[in-house]
Image: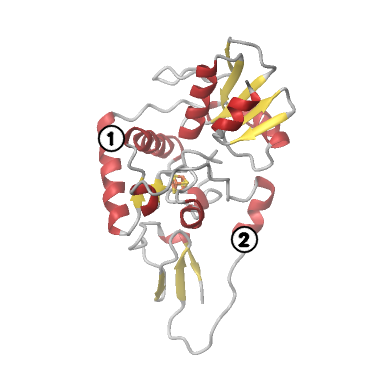
Amino acid sequence: MQYRSGITVEIVHVSGRTRGKVMLYALSTCVWCKKTKELLASLGVDHSYVFVDLLPEKEMEETMNQVLRFNPKGSFPTLVIDERRCIVGFREAEIREALA
Amino acid sequence: MTAPRMPTEDEVSALHERLHREAEEGGYHLNPDRAFTRDLVRGLLVNTARYGYASCPCRLASRSRSKDLDIICPCDYRDPDLTEYDACYCALYVSGAILTGKQQLRPVPERRPSPDQRQAVIREVRTTTIGGLAYPVWRCRVCGYLCARKDPPEVCPVCKATKERFERFI
Ligand code: SF4
């Protein structure tokens, strides 16, 4: 499914330097999510992202369960690295350090 | 879900202007970073179109207005976050210190209770009463405005929150 402006409604993979499995859970309307997404792109690391608010109901629920495992607040952006480390919010220095 | 249409730039400008005016009238300030703030205003329009209420752009809506009353913009958490972090969670609203460049924006942790704790908070009802008052006192959950009258106003005169966001205070 596509937003009329062309925003994709699924998990998107962005190729780059491998720094482990980097997964960004974001909202399409959230500006801090946008900044995090742009930071990942500028760092050039291999990662995936998904706009949780654009998912169909069932996928949204499943994805939220994944988010809640790492971030009990269920807030965005949630960045999960190697299914171990989780960075909540646009914490630029921390993200740069984790993916250096 | 069906993807909503993107609001036009004119719609964004109109809402941006109105929110700016209402904020300044009430002693609040919008983030002076125009591009950043326009993105958030666009998010509010997208959410209004797809959910029917102006849910916070930086939080996942439940699609149920009554469950999301606390995150209809301006949310119940804006004022405590302005006091503690000089900005609301999204940084749509900022303090005077940020506006004048005396403070820098920093990440605001989520103040809204986590999904498993939300119901308890919303069900919490004030039961305190003081005998002899001619009218009940209503409190706006967004900005703290108090008024003594039979029912809360349609819209909060300070922050424009709607009637159902008032709680009985006394
Ligand atoms: S006031 Fe609350 S709902 Fe509105 S943008 Fe800020 S954090 Fe989001």
Q: Residue at x 65, y 43 (%)?
A: A73
The x, y position of residue A42, in whole percent, is: 50, 18
The x, y position of residue A51, in whole percent, is: 54, 26
Q: Residue at x 38, y 26 (%)?
A: B5
Q: Is residue B81 above or below residue A97?
A: below
| Drawn side of residue B115 relative to residue B163, left or right | right
Q: Which residue is mark 1?
A: B11
Task: Judge by depth and name the residue closer to the eye, B113 or B50.
Answer: B113
Q: Residue at x 65, y 46 (%)?
A: B115
Task: Judge by depth and name the residue closer to the eye, A46 or B104.
Answer: B104
The x, y position of residue A84, in whole percent, is: 74, 28
What is the chain letter for disc 1? Answer: B
Q: Is residue A40 above or below residue A87?
A: above
Residue sticking out furthest to the bottom: B132
Q: Is residue B82 above or below residue B5?
A: below
Q: Quadrant of the C terminus of chain A?
A: top right
Q: Which residue is mark 2?
A: B123
What is the chain letter for disc 2? Answer: B
Q: Dot 2 lies on which element? A: helix
Q: Which mark is residue A10?
A: none
The reply to whether discs 2 and 1 touch (Cβ–Cβ < 8 Å) is no
* Amino acid residing under circle 1: Glu
What's the CA distance linking mark 2 and mark 1? 36 Å
Tell me if the residue at label 2 has its CB under 8 Å from ligand 1. Answer: no
> Nearer the viewer's eye, disc 2 or disc 1?
1
* Amino acid residing under circle 2: Arg
Q: How is the image coloured?
A: secondary structure
The answer to whether residue A23 shows anywhere in this view is yes
Q: Earlier in the sequence, mark 2 or mark 1?
A: 1
Are there few (<14), some (14-19), or many (20+) residues within 10 Å of tag 1?
Answer: some
